[in-house]
Amino acid sequence: MKLKKEEKKRKIIDAAIKIFARNGYFNSRVSEIAKEAGVADGTIYIYFSSKEELLSAIFDEALQVFVEESKKLLEDIHDPIEKLKKIVFLHLKHLGANRDLAMVFQIEFRHNIVFMERLSKTRLADYFKIIEGVILEGQEKGLFKELNPRFCAKILFGIIDEMVTSWLIANKNYKLEKDADILVNTFVYGIAKK
Amino acid sequence: MKLKKEEKKRKIIDAAIKIFARNGYFNSRVSEIAKEAGVADGTIYIYFSSKEELLSAIFDEALQVFVEESKKLLEDIHDPIEKLKKIVFLHLKHLGANRDLAMVFQIEFRHNIVFMERLSKTRLADYFKIIEGVILEGQEKGLFKELNPRFCAKILFGIIDEMVTSWLIANKNYKLEKDADILVNTFVYGIAKK
Amino acid sequence: MKLKKEEKKRKIIDAAIKIFARNGYFNSRVSEIAKEAGVADGTIYIYFSSKEELLSAIFDEALQVFVEESKKLLEDIHDPIEKLKKIVFLHLKHLGANRDLAMVFQIEFRHNIVFMERLSKTRLADYFKIIEGVILEGQEKGLFKELNPRFCAKILFGIIDEMVTSWLIANKNYKLEKDADILVNTFVYGIAKK
Amino acid sequence: MKLKKEEKKRKIIDAAIKIFARNGYFNSRVSEIAKEAGVADGTIYIYFSSKEELLSAIFDEALQVFVEESKKLLEDIHDPIEKLKKIVFLHLKHLGANRDLAMVFQIEFRHNIVFMERLSKTRLADYFKIIEGVILEGQEKGLFKELNPRFCAKILFGIIDEMVTSWLIANKNYKLEKDADILVNTFVYGIAKK
DNA sequence: GATGAATGAGATTTCATTCAT
DNA sequence: TATGAATGAAATCTCATTCAT
């Protein structure tokens, strides 16, 4: 029974990702999502209180999975630079493996400032914390300069973010994660010679 | 007469920036923009064929101004790193001086993939060209590693972009451009010690 | 359930006939029709895809009812002239009994050539077929001259049509069908003496 | 000067006939007519007080020309039946020679009952008077049955009207006036044999 | 819980007409 | 007289959400 409920929620979220990715949030109809999920329009409102809530749920779920996986996989790595590479690799792999989800992340979540503010204060904050933690660790180990860790985290996030968006827009079939290492190297060592 | 027409167009664009920034594109009413601009609803459609066209016009105009100014100011600078600092400084100053415009740039232009594709193939491409040119110049002068210049340009743009967005979301009153130098230094020399 | 749906459709069509007749198609508001039908504006669009579609539906339904009734009542009559009288009588009675419907038929259906072309190739064609059939029958029985049956049908239709329109415009209370017999007699025997 | 004024009025009327015929009254824009006539939008309002007035003017002018020509040409004819043939011939020739005008007459003038009422009480009444006069003359000469002349006129008008409309809808290239004689013969002698 | 018909507020855009030049 | 930019009222249709079944 409980499982059935979870299943239905899953179906609705998956349908929403697909539809939002295809048409954009504002041009997606709740009834379309319902159809794609194989449920009645009204059913969606049993599981989610509104269309926007459904968008939030996608974000929450995906980021939670991602944060948890990152934490777990980082446990066995000790070199901060390797850790950064793993984080970036996971980020790119996750989104690269699911273009629809990537679309929703890069485009649909940026719709309005209120939404973004809320997001960046919740799940996204956890993600930034992880990156910041690694930076700090690197600094403590004497590997990184004494820059503001939050500042560094933003830079790294900005780089990854741009890579994903640019991959989406290019609409070519290259592997998104292929550049993870060079990306981190450039972030860590800069573009200047020597 | 011609002037008057240009003036009215100006007024409408300024009003649109203000209203879009305040409410977001989808939650802004054309009639609101008209009221703010001091014209009749229908007048807007004499100058812009649709609400979306109006959004495009904001982007085009702002980026054109920016690209032109950048080109001019770069002429007198010869060090590639200084050039990058100037570009970043200008980018941050421009948007930092006009929070409404920044809002429209960071949030409202990202509404849908089609819109973004179109934008990134037009004006934005010019901007990327400028950054790429500087990177290439640095490489030719033996200052920068032989990385893909487009890749480097994306990284830099991603960093700047994240700074702006994060400044918007933070909603604090720090000067956006204050970090231009350290940002470029980090980009150029990396976060690693030595 | 099914019945309820049909009922609601009925109500909307009846309301539309009334409102179209009163104000004309172009000066009728969908919201007015909704109000008259006792449903919400949006409900109309569940049953009809557009305002024009609603106009078409009125025509289709009314003509279908009329064609079916004509066919049935003609079965028991054998004299072609009597058949023509019956057709004309029915036509006049139907519209004479429902001034609103007559208004829509005579005025609102003639709005544009495209609409008329479409109509005349569908339901109206059936109606012409019936008249033509009777003319042909009369010719086969040696009662009528060997004129082109389609030409004769057009003449008869033109006469009836003008009677209805002129009755509408006159806005007097005479029974429209009272002239059915004399009308057919004139059509059949002409206005010339002997 | 006066001539120039008349010329401009002419141009506007001709443009209006063309545009109304092409798109229908409601789907024609005043600005389109202005463009076609080679004048500014506002200029139309110097000559006609409104869009509807312009439609009226077309009707008035065309019918006036027609009524006057009919009267003149009928003077030399003495046989009522020949007179009817001439009237019908002229009616069909006039509209047959100018498909755009025909379109406006058959379709655009029937838009709303108020308009039709007004028309039928003014210019159209003159036209009916002419037909009625011929019928009466035929009756006085003992050629026609003692039917109500107005009734007969309506019948004849209905027949002609249907012929024109059906010609328009058919959109074939046959000469509209070719059936004038047979049409009148059928009207006068009926469809019955002997 | 699930359904899907019904709701009704609401927004973009059009276009006849005006009027300052 | 002629112009055409500006006006602003107004209407179709959409669609998130509800709720009786």
Image (cartoon, coloured by chain):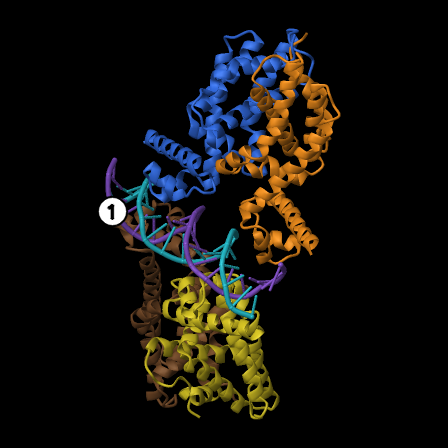
Chain colours: A orange, B blue, C yellow, D brown, E purple, F cyan
Residue A141's spot in the image, x, y percent? 67, 14
Q: Is residue C148 visible?
A: no
Task: Count up the numbered dots.
Answer: 1
Q: Nearer the viewer, residue A57 or E5?
A: A57
Q: Is residue C122 above or below residue C51?
A: below
- Percent x, y for residue D82? 41, 79
Q: Residue at x 51, y 85 (%)?
A: C87
Q: Amino acid at mark 1?
A: Met
Screen quadrant of the C terminus of chain C: bottom left
Q: Residue C40: name its quadrant.
A: bottom left
Name the quarter where the N terminus of chain C is drawn.
Answer: bottom right
Q: Which residue is mark 1?
A: D1
Percent coordinates x, y for residue B165 in the rendering: 52, 28
Displayed quadrant of residue D49: bottom left
Above or below: residue A119 compared with residue D176: above
Q: Is residue C182 visible?
A: yes
Q: What residue is shown at x 69% (from left), y 16% (from top)?
A: B147
- Classed neighbour count for the residue bearing mark 1: other residues with Cα under 10 Å, few (<14), some (14–19), many (≥20): few
Q: Of helix, strand and loop, which one carries label 1?
A: loop
Q: Position of residue B3 (x, y in %)?
A: 34, 29
Query: Label 1: chain?
Result: D
- The quadrant holding residue B130 is top right
The vertical placement of C178 against B154, above or below, is below
Judging depth in this view, the residue of A7 and C70 nearest the camera is: A7
Name the residue at 44% across, 84% down: C93
Q: Is C32 in front, or is A37?
A: A37
